[in-house]
Each structure stands twice: as C-alpha cells, then as structure tokens.
Amino acid sequence: MSLEPHVATNLGVAALLALGALAAFRVRRSPFWRERLAEVARRRPWALAVIALYVVVAGLDAVSWRDAGPGLGEPRSALERLFPADFREASYSAPLAEVEFYGGAPLRHPGRHLLGTDILGRDVLLLTLQGAKVALLVGGLTCAIAIPLALLIGVPAGWFGGRLDDLVFFLISTLASMPSILLLIALVTAIGRGPLQVCFALAVTGWVGFCRLARAETLKIRELDYVQAARALGVSTPRILWRHVLPNLTHLVVITFVLTFSGLVLSEAVLSWLGLGLDGSWGQMIDQARDELSRSPVIWWNLGAASFALFGLILAVNRVGDAVRDVLDPRTLREGA
Amino acid sequence: MSTLAAPRAEEPLVEVEGLVTTFPAGAGRRVAVVDGVDLAIGRGEVLALVGESGCGKSLTALSIVRLVPRPGRVEAGRVRLAGQVLDGRNPELWRRVRGGAIGMVFQEPMTSLNPVLTVGAQVAEVVRLHERVSRAEARRRARSLFEQVGIPDPAARLDAYPHQLSGGLKQRAMIAMALAARPALLIADEPTTALDVTVQAQILELLRRLGRELGMAVLLITHDLGVVNELADRVAVMYAGRVVEQGTRREILATPRHPYTEALLRALPARAPRGARLAEIPGAVPPPEAWPAGCRFADRCPRRFAPCEAAPDWTRLSATHAVRCHAVAGGRA
C-alpha cells in the first residue's frame, strides 16, 4: 500500500511531535538539561518565541487534508485554509492594491493581498509563511543526517585510532579540500533535486567539521578516569561508547545542531541562486528578484518578504545558538560559575 | 583456561604468581617493567604494595586484571582466586573478571565517575553487568551497597550526580561500584591520595571494615607509609619492577632488612630527629631500560658489594618475613 504524499507528510509531523514529546519527557527527568534549558529561555525569551512562531507556521503548513464530499480537489494545508480558497491573481499586484500592477486590470481579491502577489499571482504572504516549512526542513533534516553520520564515523575513529583513524582523517581532509559548492552542484546533479536529495547533499558536504570535533572529543574522553574505571569494572567497549562516551558528547551535539542550522538555511539560499534549491524556499523567492529588480517600477515586496523572513529566522537561531553555547560549553561554564 | 580446584583451608584467598609485563624499549627489545611479581593475600587480609613512583606498583595492579595500556603486554602471570585459576589471553574472560571477581578503586574519585550519569545508575550498571537481575533489583542492590559503604541518606544519593557529592562521598560511591559484584579481591590504587586528611582516615577505616566483613582480600597500593601503618596487615616493598622485601606490617616497619626499605623508612619525617635534615635516597628510580642486570638497587645501595652483580634470591628471615638482598643473605647486614 502506498501512501499519498500529503498523508505521509502528516504522519511525519505526528512522528516529529512524538519525538518532541519524548525529548521533553527526557529533559524533564534530567535536572541538568531542565536547568540548562531554563537558563537559555531566561536569556533569550524573544528569540525562542520567534523560533516557536516559525515552527508553528511550518507545522500548520505541513498538515493537510482534502475536503470531504464529491469532487475531491488537491489537499490543502491548515495554513492555506487560513486564507480564502483560490487566493490567486493573474500576475503581479502591489501590497494591498486594488488593481494589477501591470495593465491595471481589476483583482479578484482587491485590497486583500497584504504583501501583494508574485509573477504567477500567488499571495506573497502565504508564500513567505510556507517558506518556513522548507527552511526548517533544510536545517533539521540535514542536521538529522549529518550529525549521526559524523558521530558514527568520528567516535570510532577517535576510540580505536590506528588504521581506522588514518582512513577517516584521509576522508575528512579530502572532503574538506574540495570546494563545497562544486561538490554540492555535482551531488545535486547526480542524485536529483528533491528535498531529501538536497538535504543529503548538504549533509555530505557538512558533516566533516563536526566529525573532526567528535573524533577529537572521543580521543580526550577515552583517556579520562571514568572511562578507565568503567573498563576496570568490566564494562564492554560498545557499552562504554554508548553509556560513557556518547552522553558526554551530547552538549557538543546540541551546540553544533543550533549553530549549523542557520548556516544550512543560508546555504539553501545560495543553492537556489544556482538554481538547485528547494521548491517554495525563500532562496527561490529571492532568486526571482534578479528579474524583478530590473523591472521598472521595481517589484520589491517579493524579495523583501522572503529576505525578512529569512533574516528573522537566522537571527533568532543565532541568538539562541549563542546562548546555548554559553550555557553548555564547559569552558564558559566554569568562567561564569 | 580456567580450572576449578577445591581450595585448601590454609591456602590464601588470592595468589598472583610470576607476573611479567613488558614494554618495548627500542630496537625490538622489550623490557620487563613488572618482573616476576608473586603476591599472596588471605581472606580479610590487607596487603600493602609500597614503593617510589615509577617502580611498577600501579602497573602490577593493572597487570593483574590485564588492563595494561598499549604498547605494554602481560607476558606471564597466573592469578588464583578462591581456588579458581585465571590465565591466558581470552579478553572476554578478563572482562568478566574485572569488576566481577576483582574490584578496583582508583586514586581520583573526582574524575573517576561519569559526570552525566547519576551515581546510582553507575553502581547499578556494574551490578547488572555481572549478574542477571532486573533494573529494580539492581537499584535495590545499589542502595544497600551505599548503606554498606556508609553513604548517609542512600536512597536520595542514588539520584545524585557526581558533582553534587563531596570527594569522600564520591570515593565511597567508587568503592560501592567496586564491591557491586562481591569481588574476592579488591585492588585499591592510592585510594586516599586525593582526599582530605580527615576523610582519608574514614576511607581507610571503611576499607579495613569491608575487607573483614566481606572476607575479601585487599591489595592496597600506596607510597604513603602512614597509610600502610594504618591499614596494612602485611607489606610488600617494590623496587624497579620486583618485590624486594615482604613481611608483616610490624616486621617491615620495625625491622626492615632490605637497604631500600630501610632508606624509605629513614626518609619519613616522623622518624627523623627533630630539626635534623631528612634522610634521602640518593638518585631516583632509573628508567626501565637502564635497570641494572643484577640487583636493581645496586647503583643506589650503600652496602653494595661484588655479588650484587647477580640478581639476589629470596632469603627467609621468619615464616612471614623474606628479603631479596645479597648483603642480608651473606650476613653482612
């Protein structure tokens, strides 16, 4: 039985919600994480609120269903349902305009397009809001691929050393010395332009830095007394890696995730510029502005809305990222304490 | 392979025989850093292994449980524990022995506990590693272990993280972990070096009590003769990879015979006359590749004479006291 795409997406949202609930439960049970997160929330309430807003918008756009009854049309997302049905014009219209931008033909929804419409007559506000889903997908999915990959390769390299370490380091140096844009273009050309493929390509070019960090940290932890003590009390190697090494990398994972996330969202905009981005991303909207800015009079609302949305997310994530790093990084921790 | 033999009544609980550990010394040679160490410890007895830094005390302990860091290698050495002989290189066998039949306590309680797991979880982990019990049962066991090692309010302390405990409590938690599988031998490597003096005394008292109550053999590794005086029943003095003198605490501390033991004791501040300059042993333990072929203390020994070119054998002085010195054997000391 094959699932319709929108049903699969809905299930994905449900899975993410379940994961989020599990994470919240684990955090509540651990005094350390509860305390740290409360500290982040105390330092960056506004940035967190902004991120939450983006997440809610993306979530609303991810859940979609068909209307009941005969004449089943395309499924529409909860976000789209907040706007009137068939909320489109023929072409460009300025924010809150009554008539079309070129030609002056009357609009179907005069004065209702808060941020105007794009070249295909789509409402720019709706497009911008829908871009949140794409941005979070790029950041989240890529990290979800890159970080486990980096741990899977970096931790054994640091732990076992020797030939394995040499091999991994050769791989890291090789990947790091390739221009990442070139590698990205090659990968996307080779495996396709779907969301999963683009995220995979970004992950392949992005895991190297964290892999190096995970390897170095494992190298350090391996020599620590509590790992030696665990060995002296008969704990097996896989169990030491799982119980004693990985949990002590968690703070690095969290910091890397938050700091990488915003970089990835920006990378996607660059990819869009090269024509390799994801459909419906802010990067694509900005890319369109190449033509729009050369028109006269200039079409600015499309570019402005996408840039502002992108800027807001990146700023909020970076602000939270700084706080997370300060709160979790043992070095700043000690100075602050 | 391990074989089971019925233990005889007079047999010591733990015997280590012919322990040899080598490290590469360049040009394809390997030098024995632990060179034929034999130890025997009875039930409830505390044997102190003493010596200067670099003489191989800690390496002896690590060799017993086959945890010698690379590129070191245990070449030989049988361990007999309660009649069971442990030998060979099977890593899985030795993994089960560690924390099972042999428990270990380390010097640094501050860093020997995983900072992100509760101490209760860490004790329960060792319990479950060596016995098939449920999580709840492991937790109950951890709690009773905490009681046994004198941690106040054990139920609440199970859920504490290491940074929430004092150094003394952490060391007690480490001891609880080492005792989790009811070992026959407890190896304590400088267990009190990192602790306050008042806490030191408590931990030593605890080790003595546990050794007696649980009928364990305790191997105490220390360079602190004050600790030896406090806790040890018998003492083995180690120098440059070999045991050079063995005896009861009284024999070693009151009537030492080996020149090295004598020198160690003279270097104790409490024994020196007031105001006098402390005696010192000239030189330092040479690095293993420079150890002399014969008696290894010969270069620093005031009583050195011709026979010292050859390695000395044991000279029995009493049922419990033995020394490896040509000068003693030849009646020159």
Image: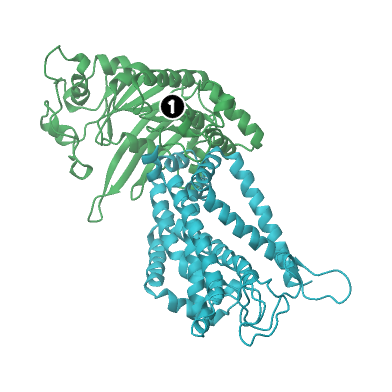
Chain colours: A cyan, B green
Q: Is residue A105 left or right of residue B287?
A: right
Q: Is residue A132 left or right of residue A318?
A: right
Circle 1: element type = loop
**Residue at 46% over, 56% down:** A155
Considering depth in this image, is B95 or A9 the residue closer to the camera?
A9
* Above or below B92: residue B3: above
Residue B12 visible: no
Residue A128 image point, x, y percent? 60, 69
Q: Is residue B154 left or right of residue B209?
A: right
Disc 1: which residue: B166
Considering depth in this image, is A190 or A225 the residue closer to the camera?
A190
Residue at the top extreme? B274
Considering depth in this image, is B319 or A308 the residue closer to the camera?
A308
Residue B132 image point, x, y percent? 64, 38
Residue at the bottom extreme? A103
Residue A110 image point, x, y percent? 70, 75
* Above or below B118: residue B202: above
> Image quadrant of residue A126?
bottom right
Residue A318 image point, x, y percent? 47, 57
> Image quadrant of residue B18?
top left
* Above or below B26: residue A82: below
The kind of residue tagged 1 is Ser
Q: Residues within 10 Å of mark 1 (few under 14, many from 20)?
A: few
Considering depth in this image, is A93 or B286 the residue closer to the camera?
A93
* Above or below A59: residue A227: above
Residue A140 visible: yes
